[in-house]
């Protein structure tokens, strides 16, 4: 008998799933996503959540965001301490894709730990040879309880004379933010506007113009930290990040971020930062999260 996913549909069970996922770094993308669904706080990205084999003893969680402006987002998470048969996992992935896409061939983004992404790729290529993918390999950074307390006890960094903290104007300045994002594509301007309108963000201005900023994705991770070149090496990147940490903690959620494996400067700085913990395996080796984009030819 093939494995069967259970879709979590009631408010009570979504809250249970949110609590379950909050216990596992592997499922770090789920709690804030579920929050936006429960509170209807990001209607541009409605969420569906699935569990296997059941909510009382979960092994796997699956998440689907049917985004209004950008390609759909899928996320997979295996509960720590559990094991999955590879064929069983492929069956689950196939069932998940059928449940959310039906027979439609839909370009999409999938987010998961590296070993799950490999199995997702196997399932995709078994289904059809007409798919291509691009991968973004990342290290994940999160905050422990002691780091959260330290962050709350730490004042915002002072910024140089002429600079000041402020908010981004979602309608007038979303394009400025979106144009700095390396991975921006079709629909991302509208998605960026929605993020700035509905979720915490941080901004530092100079002469009235935004020169450094960072925002949160509706999955909860810090997104698109950017400092314009003429204003770099002044601590502004660290300042907007600290401001966003405070704002995220103030709404009751745990800050986390991903850093590209090939971005050595930011990666080394994040590892050295006493407010961040890098997700590692039992041997202390950095785990890899992959953002994998699938295109149909």
Image: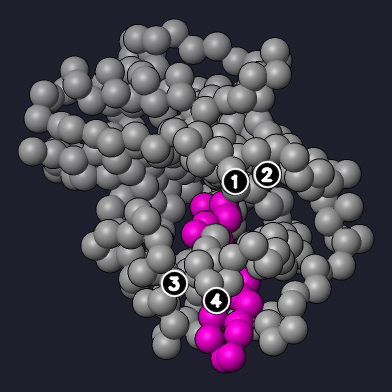
CA gap between label 3 and label 1 equals 19 Å
State the quadrant of the N terminus.
Answer: top left
SS at mark 4 in the image: strand
Mark 1: secondary structure: helix
Res 99 seen here: no
Q: On the image, numbered disc 1 is attached to which residue?
A: 266
Q: CA distance from mark 1 to mark 4?
A: 18 Å
| 10 Å crowding of disc 1: few (<14), some (14-19), many (20+) | few
Residue depth check, mark 4 versus mark 3: number of the one nearer the observer:
4
Which residue is under mark 4? Answer: 211
Q: From the viewer's side, name the closer residue of 40 and 282.
A: 282
For label 2, the residue is: 269
Q: Residue 104 appears at what percent x and percent y?
A: 14, 43
Farthest-out residue, right: 153
Left or right, residue 107 beside residue 117: left
Looking at the picture, does residue 6 appear above or below residue 241? above
Q: Residues within 10 Å of mark 2 (few under 14, many from 20)?
A: few
Give the number of the mark in front: 3 or 1: 1
Tell which circle, 2 or 3, labels the residue nearer the N-terminal end: 3
């Amino acid at each position: 008998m093939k494995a069967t996913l259970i879709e979590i549909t009631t408010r009570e069970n979504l809250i249970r799933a949110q609590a379950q996922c909050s216990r596992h770094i592997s499922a770090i993308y789920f709690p804030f996503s579920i929050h936006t669904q429960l509170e209807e706080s990001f209607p541009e990205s409605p969420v569906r959540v699935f569990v296997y084999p059941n909510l009382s003893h979960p092994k796997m969680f699956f998440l689907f965001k049917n985004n209004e402006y950008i390609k759909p987002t899928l996320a997979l998470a295996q509960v720590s301490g559990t094991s999955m048969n590879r064929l069983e996992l492929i069956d689950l992935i196939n069932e998940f894709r059928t449940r959310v896409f039906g027979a439609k061939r839909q370009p999409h983004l999938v987010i998961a730990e590296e070993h799950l992404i490999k199995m997702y790729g196997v399932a995709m290529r078994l289904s059809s040879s007409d798919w291509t993918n691009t991968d973004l390999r990342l290290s994940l950074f999160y905050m422990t309880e002691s780091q959260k307390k330290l962050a709350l006890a730490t004042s915002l960094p002072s910024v140089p004379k002429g600079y000041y903290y402020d908010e981004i104007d979602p309608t007038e300045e979303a394009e400025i933010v979106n144009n700095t994002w390396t991975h921006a594509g079709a629909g991302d301007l509208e998605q960026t506007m929605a993020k700035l309108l509905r979720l915490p963000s941080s901004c530092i201005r100079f002469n009235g113009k935004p020169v450094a900023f960072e925002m949160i994705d509706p999955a909860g991770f810090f997104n698109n930290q950017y400092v314009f070149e003429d204003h770099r090496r002044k601590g502004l990147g660290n300042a907007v990040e600290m401001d966003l940490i405070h704002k995220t903690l103030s709404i009751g959620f745990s800050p986390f971020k991903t850093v590209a494996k090939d971005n050595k400067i930011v990666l080394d700085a994040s590892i050295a930062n006493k407010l961040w913990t890098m997700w590692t395996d039992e041997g202390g080796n950095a785990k890899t999260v992959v953002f994998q984009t699938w295109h149909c030819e």
